[in-house]
Image (tube, rainbow, N blue to C red):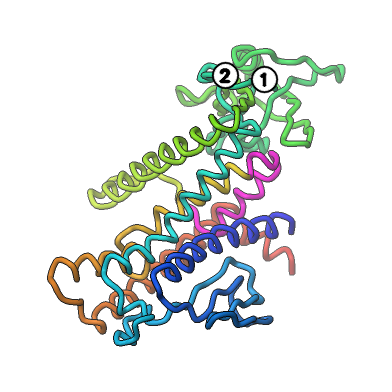
C-alpha cells in the first residue's frame, strides 16, 4: 500500500509540473485557460479567479489544463490558442516538456548537494563518505535473483556457521568468497536502506562467462556531496547526460525493431514503474529523489516525440503548417491525434500485461480473493 501511495505521489508530481508548464506559458502568451485542475475529475471543488477555474479533483494522478481553442476552434477569439502564431503555440506545447527537464535538474541538484552514491574510482571532487560494496546489477535466472538480492543492496559481510559476521572490505573479497564457495550454501548480511537482511543462497558451479557464481555485478561506492553552487551545475550537467543516454537507447530500440533484431531493452509501463518505485523506496529517500528525476527526464523525452496525441506530435503539425504556409486540415489532424492516442493506449495495455506476467502479479492478485 505504501508503494502505491509513493507511486501516485511521484506520478502526480511529474504530471502536475508538466501541466503547470502549459498553464504558465499559455497565460504569458495571452491564451485563456478555462481550468487548471489538480488531479482528474470528478471534481471535489473549484474556485474561479480571473476567468480560470482552479479545481481539486478526486483522482490524484497529476493534473490537467483546459485551454481555450486547444483543438483548433475559436480562431477569431484573440484569447484562443488557435488564434496565436505558430511559434507561440509551439512554445505553449513545449513548456510542459521544459518543466519536466527543469524538475529533473532541480532534483538531481538536490541529490548532489545532499550526497549521491557514486562509484569510488570515478569520484572527482566533492566530499566523500559512507564507503560500501553495492550490487549494481542482478542477472536474470541466477542464484542472486532467487535470493531476492536487488540492485542497490549493500553486501556488508557473510554470516558463518557459528553465527559470527565476517565483513568484506573490497569487491575482490566478495568475488573470491563466491568462487571458493561454489555449490555451498552461504548467508549474506545485506543492508537495504534502513533494513538489515540475512539472505541465503547457493553460488552455482556452472555459469555463463562474465556473470560469476552468484550472478551479480558489484562496485565500491561512496556518497559524495558538493557545495550548492557545484551541485546546481552538476544537476544540469547530469540531466543533459541522462537525456542523451536515453535518446540513444530509444533510437537504438527503434532501429532494432525496424531491422527485425532483438530489442534487448526491458520496457516497463506504469505497473513495472510502480514495482521499481517500491524497490527504490526501500533504499531510502535520496534514491527516490534520483529515481523521480530520471522518470521526469523519460516523461519529457517521450512527450516531445513527434507522435500524434503527444506534445511533439502537435508541434509537428505546427511545423508542417509553417512549411506549407497554411494550416493542416483540422479534421485530418484530429483523426491523426485520435489514431495516435488509440495506438498509445494499445501499447500501454500490452506493456501493462507484460508487467503483470514479468512480476508475477497475476497470481498475487488472484490470491487476494
Q: Is residue 274 above or below residue 75?
A: above
| Residue at horizontal 59 percent and vertical 80 percent from the top | 49
Helix, strand or loop under label 2? helix
| Residue at horizontal 66 percent and vertical 49 percent from the top | 278
Q: Is residue 339 left or right of residue 327?
A: right
Q: Is residue 279 magenta?
A: yes
Q: In the rendered image, which residue does mark 1 sit on?
A: 131
Name the N-terminal-most of marks 2 and 1: 2
Q: Give me the C-alpha separation between circle 2 and circle 1.
A: 8 Å
Q: 217 or 335: which is nearer to us? A: 335
Q: 367 or 309: which is nearer to us? A: 309
Spot occupied by residue 121 in the image (x, y as percentages of width and height)? 53, 16
Spot occupied by residue 1 in the image (x, y as percentages of width and height)? 74, 59
Q: Is residue 161 above or below residue 309?
A: above
Q: Residues within 10 Å of mark 2 (few under 14, many from 20)?
A: some
The quarter of the picture where residue 305 lies is bottom left
Cβ atoms at labels 2 and 1 below 8 Å apart: yes
| Residue at horizontal 64 percent and vertical 37 percent from the top | 146
Q: Is residue 114 magenta?
A: no
Instruction: Please state the extent of the stretch shown in magenta in the rendering.
Output: 268-288
Helix, strand or loop under label 1? strand
Q: Is residue 60 left or right of residue 337?
A: right
Q: Of the numbered discs in the image, which one, if any, rests on residue 120? A: 2
Spot occupied by residue 108 in the image (x, y as percentages of width and height)? 55, 40
Q: Is residue 334 above or below residue 142?
A: below
The quarter of the picture where residue 116 lies is top right
Residue 231 visible, this orientation: yes
Spot occupied by residue 101 in the image (x, y as percentages of width and height)? 46, 50
Q: Is residue 123 above or below residue 289?
A: above
Amino acid at each position: 500500500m505504501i508503494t502505491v501511495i509513493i507511486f501516485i505521489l511521484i506520478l502526480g508530481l511529474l504530471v502536475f509540473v508538466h501541466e503547470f508548464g502549459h498553464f504558465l506559458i499559455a497565460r504569458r502568451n495571452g491564451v485563456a485557460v478555462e481550468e487548471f485542475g489538480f488531479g482528474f475529475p470528478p471534481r471535489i471543488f473549484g474556485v474561479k479567479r480571473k476567468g480560470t477555474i482552479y479545481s481539486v479533483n478526486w483522482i490524484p494522478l497529476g493534473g490537467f489544463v483546459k485551454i481555450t481553442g486547444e483543438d483548433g476552434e475559436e480562431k477569431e477569439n484573440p484569447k484562443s490558442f488557435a488564434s496565436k502564431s505558430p511559434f507561440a503555440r509551439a512554445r505553449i506545447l513545449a513548456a510542459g516538456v521544459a518543466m519536466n527537464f527543469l524538475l529533473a535538474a532541480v532534483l538531481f541538484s538536490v541529490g548532489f548537494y545532499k550526497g549521491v552514491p557514486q562509484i569510488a574510482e570515478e569520484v572527482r571532487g566533492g566530499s566523500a563518505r559512507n564507503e560500501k560494496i553495492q550490487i549494481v546489477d542482478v542477472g536474470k535466472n541466477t542464484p542472486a535473483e532467487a535470493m531476492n538480492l536487488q540492485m542497490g543492496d549493500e553486501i556488508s559481510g557473510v554470516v558463518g556457521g557459528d553465527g559470527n559476521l565476517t565483513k568484506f572490505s573490497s569487491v575482490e573479497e566478495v568475488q573470491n568468497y563466491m568462487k571458493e564457495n561454489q555449490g555451498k550454501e552461504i548467508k549474506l548480511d545485506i543492508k537495504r536502506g534502513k533494513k538489515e537482511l540475512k539472505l541465503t543462497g547457493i553460488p552455482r558451479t556452472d555459469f555463463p562467462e562474465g556473470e560469476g557464481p552468484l550472478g551479480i555485478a558489484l562496485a565500491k561506492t561512496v556518497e559524495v556531496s558538493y557545495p550548492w553552487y557545484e551541485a546546481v551545475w552538476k544537476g544540469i550537467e547530469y540531466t543533459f547526460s541522462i537525456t542523451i543516454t536515453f535518446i540513444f537507447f530509444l533510437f537504438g530500440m527503434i532501429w532494432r525493431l525496424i531491422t527485425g533484431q532483438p530489442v534487448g531493452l526491458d520496457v516497463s509501463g506504469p505497473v513495472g514503474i510502480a514495482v521499481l518505485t517500491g524497490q527504490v523506496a526501500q533504499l531510502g529517500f535520496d534514491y527516490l529523489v534520483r529515481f523521480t528525476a530520471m522518470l521526469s527526464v523519460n516523461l519529457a523525452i517521450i512527450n516531445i516525440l513527434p507522435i500524434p496525441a503527444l506534445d511533439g506530435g502537435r508541434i509537428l503539425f505546427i511545423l508542417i503548417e509553417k512549411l506549407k504556409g497554411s494550416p493542416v486540415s483540422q479534421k485530418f489532424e484530429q483523426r491523426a491525434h485520435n489514431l495516435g492516442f488509440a495506438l498509445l493506449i494499445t501499447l500501454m495495455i500490452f506493456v501493462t500485461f507484460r508487467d503483470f506476467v514479468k512480476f508475477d502479479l497475476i497470481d498475487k492478485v488472484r490470491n487476494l480473493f
